[in-house]
Image: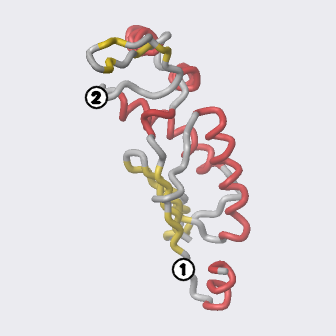
Amino acid sequence: MIISIDAEKAFDKIQHPFMIKTLNKICLQGTYLNIIEAVYDKPSANITLNNEKLKTFHLRSGTRQGCPLSPLLFNIILEVLASKIGQEKDIKGLKIGNEEVKLSLFADDMILYIENPKDSTRTLLERVSKYSKVSGYKTNIQISIVFLHSNNEVSEMKWKK
């Protein structure tokens, strides 16, 4: 089974406290961490409507639109989930030679390669759900796709139902 997961409004959803905690865990420190913390410490925005500036509101999630650091920050945050999936023994990836391949990442997309969907899918969904709760990550169900293929047509038909 191959699962293509698209993140819904990827850069808008990441929770700032989770982002800072993750950056600390990967040992980002000094000037770089200080700059990122300054940018994301109590950020605010306002809207101008009919040339009138409306009340300022605080932002609790999302990376800065147009900021060159935003894709990198998102990828660092997504790596937390990728690492958990990679380390999870109950999620079986595809065997290619001696290697087990479970996933690949590209921008805000994650492609998962699952050998035994019956045994792996529940654990995979639990990991994604837990990660979503703490990080703000949300799956775009409308764009995410599951490709099912096996050498056993009976097994494949059961999954399609």
Q: Secondary structure at mark 1?
A: loop
Drawn side of residue 80 relative to residue 133, left or right = left
Residue 82: % across, % down: 54, 46
Query: 103 above or below 28?
Result: below
Q: Residues within 10 Å of mark 2 (few under 14, many from 20)?
A: few
Drawn side of residue 46 relative to residue 2, left or right = left
Kindly indicate the quadrant of the structure image that contains residue 65.
Answer: top left
Quadrant into which the C terminus falls: bottom right
Q: Residues within 10 Å of mark 1 (few under 14, many from 20)?
A: some
> How many labels sit on residues?
2
Kindly indicate the quadrant of the structure image that contains residue 137.
Answer: top right
Q: Which residue is mark 2?
A: 66
Kindly indicate the quadrant of the structure image that contains residue 107.
Answer: top left
CA gap, disc 2 to disc 1? 39 Å
**Residue 101: mark:** none
Q: Amino acid at mark 1?
A: His
Quadrant into which the N terminus falls: bottom right
Q: Is residue 160 visible?
A: yes
